[in-house]
Image (spheres, rainbow, N blue to C red):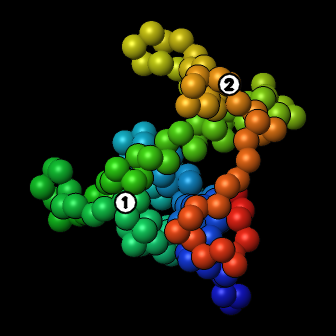
Amino acid sequence: MVKRTSFEHDDCPIARSLDAIGDWWSMLIIREALFGVSRFGEFQKRLGLAKNILAVRLRALVDQGILKTAPASDGSAYQEYLLTPKGRGVFPILVALRQWSEEFDEHPEEIASILVDKEKGRPVRKLELYSQDGRLLGAGDTALKPRTAVKQNRRVRA
């Protein structure tokens, strides 16, 4: 088995984020948890992944503080996996991935659902990035600036 490189202490926040949630199974587990799935068997049934892989991913998400375990809400002997605030914070990332796919997928007609506002039933607007003063920003309108507390001999990356 090849040991995966860890980016846990990398100076890049994107690398650190990917270290915590970067594999597709973890992202899909979080997606299902956002839809209310909380039991091991439910995750396994909805995602169709092997139990051993699911167990490893769930444990990693708990270790990362993205999920927490709790006794089953129905009083049974099972445990549930519940999103923490850190886990719920993944929601905009999943929306961004979804919207990117809806825009650039070669077969968007095969996408089975659209994301809508529950209250109004209307599609959610595309995520946008704004400056502090309210200007819409694109990649060319941003730059990376070193933090003063970070050692100056490190490279600054996204």
Location of mark 2 (residue): 136
Q: Position of residue 36 (x, y in %)?
A: 37, 42
Answer with mark 2 or mark 1, whichever residue precedes in sequence: 1
**In this rendering, the label closer to the viewer, 2 or 1:** 2
Single out the residue that lies furthest toward the left: 75
87 or 59: nearer the viewer = 87
Relative vertical location of residue 130 with respect to residue 125 in this rendering, above or below:
below
138 or 31: nearer the viewer = 138
Q: How many marks?
A: 2
Quadrant occupied by the C terminus: bottom right
Tell me the amino acid under the disc marked 2.
Leu
Q: Residue drawn at (18%, 61%), measured in percent from left and top?
A: 71
Q: Residue drawn at (48%, 52%), measured in percent from left and top?
A: 30
Quadrant occupied by the N terminus: bottom right
Location of mark 1 (residue): 67
1 or 84: nearer the viewer = 84
